Amino acid sequence: MARRKKIYEGKAKILYEGPEPGTIVQYFKDDATAFNAEKKDVIDGKGVLNNRLSEFFMTGLNQIGVPTHFIRRLNMREQLVRNCEIVPLEIIVRNYAAGTMSKRLGIAEGTQLPRPIVEYCYKDDALGDPLVTEEHIAAFGWASQQDMDDILSLALRVNDFMSGMMLAVGIRLVDFKIEIGRVYDGDFQRLIVADEISPDSCRLWDIETGQKLDKDVFRRDLGSLTDAYSEVARRLGVLPKSNVAKPTLIN
């Protein structure tokens, strides 16, 4: 059987042509990157954990009526997703100050924000995904005003869902990043949550201890990234312990 045609390879995933029209196979790699890929490593089992966790979150969103690109998981590292046109923005929702917000505004990490704050970054690795305003988005035609209204609504609904789910297992959702895709049904366009939702794209802190359970473990050399992601999966009941400890690659 011929290998599927590769469409795109990013820092953490590879996209292949799907088995049916309008579908894509999304493969999760073990590669870890930080600081715009200046720091790199391969973390055994990371792709397996992110595949299962993203499946868990996307399935939950679909069940509550938040549309996503997720169709089904194919194996330990791959999932079938709907092909969509990605809006060239990263949508960041912040519940607590951390990372670049703390640096930009001089707010101590961990400070609870008055309300969830939504920020937008232009997706361009060469530019370091710069922060942009709605004025930039409108002026350069990256999204319409209706798109922005829908994106804001989707982002806040994802935040409500994820915050509640994490709180139930003793984890604080500090912030997260999502991407949004456009799909077309005839002449009708709608927006859906795309890419992934995983500890790679969220900041997750233990409520009691403040222990980081996300990619900051890798960014800041705080221990084992696989252990941190496995702890999130364990609390959510996503993977049995035996599978978390020694994930198996299935192509």
Image: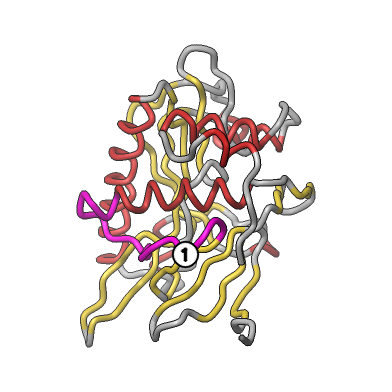
Q: How is the rendered protein coloured?
A: secondary structure
Give the camera-side residue of 244 and 49: 244
Report x, y in % for residue 187. 22, 86
Image-based side of 217 in relation to 171, left or right: right
Is 135 above or below relative to 239? below
Q: Residue at x 47, y 79 (%)?
A: 18
Q: Residue at x 71, y 37 (%)?
A: 219
The residue furthest top is 208
Residue 188 picture quarter: bottom left
Report x, y in % for residue 37. 74, 53
Is 169 above or below relative to 187? above
Report x, y in % for residue 102. 57, 30
Look at label 1 and name its amino acid. Leu
Is 250 above or below relative to 22? above
In which quadrant will I find the C terminus?
A: bottom right
Q: Which residues are magenta?
A: 61-77
Report x, y in % for residue 213. 57, 30
Query: Does the magenta run of residues contain 151?
Result: no
Image-based side of 155 in relation to 19, left or right: left
Image-based side of 164 in relation to 230, left or right: left
Query: Does the magenta run of residues contain 70?
Result: yes
In which quadrant will I find the N terminus?
A: bottom right
Q: Which residue is mark 1?
A: 74
Give the camera-side residue of 130 and 233: 233
Q: Residues within 10 Å of mark 1 (few under 14, many from 20)?
A: some
Give the camera-side residue of 198 and 47: 47
Image-based side of 68 in relation to 99, left or right: left
Q: Secondary structure at mark 1?
A: loop
